[in-house]
Image (cartoon, rainbow, N blue to C red):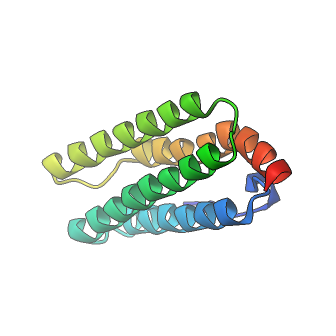
Amino acid sequence: MKDLLWDKTLSVDVPEIDQDHRRLLELFNRLAHAVAEAEPQAEIEAIMDELISCTAWHFRHEERLMDKHGVPGRDEHRAEHQDLINSGRALQQQLQQSSRPPSAQEIEFLEHWLTGHIYGTDMAMGAHLAEVM
């Protein structure tokens, strides 16, 4: 299992957003390690819950900044946030009901869930925020 490592390519050039993203990467790595090391299901579920909760908080943080600074495309960005949280919570519920850890494909889904958003819409948001903040 390879950790997701923070590097400049993940930076949106807004320190407070980058700090949030670093935290989310740490949580993802903790989850992936817990699964790889076959830690108890309760521990895996707790980490997954923390990852989803922190992601939801982070999205609200981004949305406050987007509203405050008039980021173009914020309605679409907000809708993407909602879709991501819904898909993360659906996976979480599925795992809890089946009492099993995430599969390799589900870990890969979560990796793309996290990094895809950063590399996509967050970069555009960051470019705007970096200019106006």
Residue pictured at 31% horizontal, 71% vertical: 39
Query: Viewer-proximal residue, 28 or 99?
Result: 28
Asked whether, in this view, residue 72 is left or right of residue 2, the answer is right
Q: Is residue 93 left or right of residue 17?
A: left
Q: Residue furthest right?
A: 131
How far from the left and from the top, in percent, is residue 16? Answer: 67, 65
Q: Name the residue: 80% across, 45% down.
A: 127
Which quarter of the figure has residue 43?
bottom left
Which quadrant is the C terminus positioned in?
bottom right
Image coordinates for residue 14, horizontal then vertical, percent: 75, 59
Nearest the camera: 12 or 62? Answer: 62
At a point 44% along the width and 58% down the height, the residue shown is: 57
Total residue callouts: 0
User: Where is residue 69 shown, x and y percent of the image?
Assistant: 69, 46
Tell me residue 81's x, y (percent).
Answer: 48, 39
Q: Is residue 5 visible?
A: no
Inspect this view and state whether residue 131 appears.
yes
Identify the image quadrant of the N terminus: bottom right
Residue 108 position (above or below residue 13):
above
Foreground residue among 47 and 41: 47
